[in-house]
Image: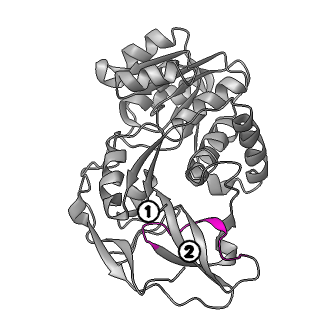
Amino acid sequence: MTVPSTGTEVRLATRPEGWPTTENFSVVQAEPPAVRTGQVLIRNLVMSVDPYMRGRMNKTRSYVPPFAVGKALDGGAVGEVVVSKSSQLAVGDLVLHGLGWREYAVVGAAGAVRIDPALAPPGAYLGVLGMPGHAAYTGLLKAAEFRPGDTVFVSGAAGAVGSLVGQIARLCGAERVIGSAGSAEKVAYLTGELGFDAAFDYKDGPVLEQLAKAAPTGIDVYFDNVGGDHLDAALVLARMGARFALCGNISQANEKDPPAGPRNLTQAIAKGITLRGVLVGGHADLPDEFTARMGGWLADGRISYRETVVRGLENAPAAFIDMLRGANTGKMLVRIAE
């Protein structure tokens, strides 16, 4: 194909204070960088928007650098190689890489992983077979040290990560799997299509009361995507020696004031609870194991997933904000091109 002289990219215009708005982003035309030896030019087809990106919009230290004001954002994307100066990748290859939020990206061959569209559609490599899948698998089996017979509670259970955590727990022998979500439709999705034993809409009443009804004998594992009152409730209802995987705190990510700490943290002392953060990059030994097991479950039809797809790169900021507000079921994706 003929590569245009410019391509669309989305930049961080200003750092959000509280909830981000579309005014925090700018959509511009930019010339693609030159392709040097060992690099490829990729035309992006689909990109991911994820909760962790909100933290990178703040100027704070974390496990990844913050986004730079005036520069294009980045994140997971799948695209087609249109120019190659690498012996490892050919024109026409579909690859997974980390430079989303733009129409064209130049990456070194080492930073792009060839995908097999015959195994799964491109978007799946940003969800069930990508970082969210890795986070679900790693967080449950390693951070939370899941054991067969556990009662597992998952918050944000209809999202990209939570929806997979519950299914993996069920497949690995959980005694009971419980989820919380933000609508009656999502609750029905959890207990129907995904096979959760119980689920509740956290908007229907206090989380502690609803979780106590769903788990009258307590929980062994809590996979936390939300923080706040969900974490407080899980601490109260945890059994002795419970294990918590802390993957996200979306309920507090957009607060202007520093969030209050968990009110019930003394429960962790009294019950010997383990709280461990989930960092996919901290388990470099797991990608092959994850891909083999998740690929097998997908092939056998034992894992189900959904995608919420927004079309047009210019709509990526709105898609990101909608994802933060829970408008998606499953993985939120932005379709850039066919």
Q: Inspect the image, locate mark 1, and give the three-letter code of the amino acid beneath it.
A: Ile
- Residue 273 at x, y percent in the picture: 59, 30
> Closer to the camera, 138 or 332?
332
322 w.r.t. 302: above or below: below
Q: Which picture quadrant has residue 313?
A: bottom left
Colour convention of the picture: one colour
Q: Secondary structure at mark 2?
A: strand
38 w.r.t. 254: above or below: below
Q: Which picture quadrant has residue 147?
A: top right
Residue 90 is covered by the magenta coloring: yes
Q: Earlier in the sequence, mark 1 or mark 2?
A: 2
Question: Seen in the image, is 317 located left or right of residue 80?
Answer: left
Task: Characterize the magenta stretch by its predominant secondary structure.
Answer: loop
> Closer to the camera, 81 or 276?
81
Please name the residue shown 48% across and 31% down the image.
157
Q: Please report the bounds of the magenta region as a residue range.
A: 89-103
Q: For mark 1, what is the residue?
A: 336
Q: Residue furthest front?
A: 1
- Residue 197 at x, y percent in the picture: 56, 15
Residue 334 is covered by the magenta coloring: no
Q: How many callouts does the rendering have?
A: 2
On residue 42, the disc is: 2
- Residue 78 at x, y percent in the picture: 56, 62
- Residue 329 at x, y percent in the picture: 43, 36
Q: Secondary structure at mark 1?
A: loop
Asked if residue 312 shows in the view, the reply is yes
Asked if residue 274 shows in the view, the reply is no
